Amino acid sequence: AGVGRVLAWNGGSLWIGRSAGHSAMHSHHAIQLSIALAGPFELKAGRTGAWSRHTAALVRPDAQHEFNGCDTTIAQVFVEPETSYGRALLAMYPDGDVVPLALGDAQRCVNVLARQFEARASNAALVTSAQACVATLAGLAPRATPSIDARIERVLQELRARFAQPVSLAEAARWAHLSPSRFRHLFAELHLPDAFAA
């Protein structure tokens, strides 16, 4: 719970504002980048994990966790793991469900994001700054939107629309206009987290 702004783009979203409490144990498929814009926050990994304090942290896709915003101003950036940014983040931070982040070069982006939020900057400005933070943390150059093969994006859209229904490899390949073997190869190149690839 909290008060702030929620902005989305293809492959990610920014939730920025003052946190009013903590979330119950949950998981989501997006990579979560939690960045303190004021005081620190707390995260708990899994039902048996201990609470840990952070100024910046990454939560891996599908990881069970709790979040406590500690009544401070937070930028929560969610990145789809299938995007180039998502794949790069997972490659850079391969271990642990909740990983502390050293902001390093990204600190400048974070400072800009904090100033923009306080100044009530435009949605476009906030999105650009959030994407720059993600790109820097992922070790990639910023660009307008995270890229993903259009054929795979088409299949992902169909899968989201049919989330509760089983889908065969042959059916997914038809959506991508590829042979099943070529689709399997292209999809495997994404290096998806096991829970998604299954």
Image (spheres, grey):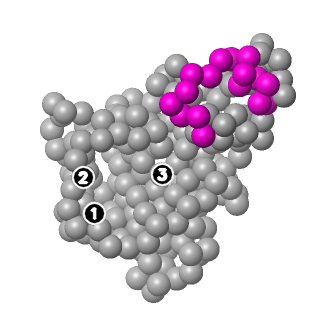
Viewed as shown, does residue 149 lie left or right of 16?
right
According to the picture, the residue beneath numbered tag 2 turns out to be 23
Amino acid type assigned to the residue bearing label 2 in the image: Ser
Residue under the point 39% across and 45% down: 58
Residue under the point 55% across and 27% down: 165
CB-based contact (under 8 Å), mark 1 and mark 2:
yes
Q: Residues within 10 Å of mark 1 (few under 14, many from 20)?
A: few
Residue under the point 32% across and 73% down: 3
Q: Which mark is residue 78?
A: 3
According to the picture, the residue beneath numbered tag 1 turns out to be 1
CA separation in Å, label 1 and label 2: 7 Å
Viewed as shown, does residue 20 lie left or right of 29?
left
Position above or below: 148 against 77: above
Closer to the camera in the image, 27 or 100: 27
Disc 2, SS? strand
Q: Earlier in the sequence, mark 3 or mark 2?
A: 2
x then y, percent, for residue 161: 60, 40
The boundaries of the magenta stretch are 161-176
Q: Quadrant of the N terminus?
A: bottom left
